[in-house]
Amino acid sequence: MPDNPRIEELRRRVQRDPASIAFAQLAEEYRRAGRFQEAIETCCAGLEQHPGYLSARVTLGRSLIEVGEIDHAQLELAQVLSAAPENLAALRGLAEIHHRRGELPDALRYYRSALDLARHDPDLEQVVQDIARRLAPSARPDVPEGLTFEQAREELLSIARPPVTNPPAAEAPHSAPLEAEAPPPAPLGTEAPLLAPLEAEEGSAGDRDIAREQLALFERWLGAITEERQRREVQS
């Protein structure tokens, strides 16, 4: 099947003058036609003569992505951004590279930079929303072993809280008030402290001391997660 007239014309121009900058247009036409290897070869040959031709280097990077040469593509597109930080095609190319690798925070950063330059681009808006949603922490994530934060916290409290023991019936004064039952822990997300003060008791078992330490570590861990979630919500 013969080439389209545009490719044929550009190829003749490059054949007549190998130093012609028409190589960049020819390579881009190859890329649009899905002829990525020919686009790569044309770019490489032309860039030997014109190494600073950024549009050709973008075409090269985008074509390399299509043939799976991701590392080489990243080098080419990063070189473009070092000279032209607002090159939209290079930003999108690097975003796609990180997206393909599963490096979502880096992908989101480049996609957002591209969206700043191409506002209201529906494709960019959609991919930014999708990745941001995937990176956002869930409202109440579960901890290992299938326990929620509330369940794990209550289990630690049950170990750390000293047991309530009733004195022998014969020795207990009739007027002695019943020991108040420990209040339930405050629910997450309220203004109340995460833990009510634990009552001290002489002779507490060693396992309750260990549980207290674990509970304190758990609360600090949970607080750090909450702060990080709030920070990300502010930034997003």
Image (cartoon, grey):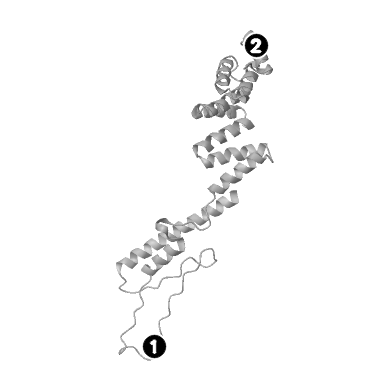
Q: Amino acid at mark 1?
A: Ala
The label number, if any, that marks residue 176 in the structure image = 1
Residue 183 position in % (x across, y down): 46, 74
The crowding category of the residue bearing disc 1, from other C-alpha atoms within 10 Å (few below 14, some 14 to 19, many at least 20), is few
Residue 106 position in % (x across, y down): 53, 39
Considering the image in quadrants, where does the N terminus appear? top right
Question: Viewer-proximal residue, 104 or 215?
Answer: 104
Tag nearer the camera, 1 or 2:
2
The residue sitting at 53% across, 42% down in the picture is: 105
**Element carrying mark 1:** loop
The residue sitting at 45% across, 58% down in the picture is: 220
Give above or below for 48 relative to 61. Answer: above
Question: Viewer-proximal residue, 232 or 69?
Answer: 69
The label number, if any, that marks residue 12 in the structure image = 2
Label 1 to label 2, Cα distance in Å? 106 Å
Q: CB atoms at circles 1 and 2 under 8 Å apart? A: no
Question: Viewer-proximal residue, 108 or 173?
Answer: 108
Residue 118 position in % (x across, y down): 68, 37
**Element carrying mark 2:** helix
Q: Amino acid at mark 2?
A: Arg
Question: Viewer-proximal residue, 217 or 134?
Answer: 134
Seen in the image, is 180 located left or right of residue 21?
left
Of callouts 1 and 2, the N-terminal one: 2
The label number, if any, that marks residue 138 in the structure image = none
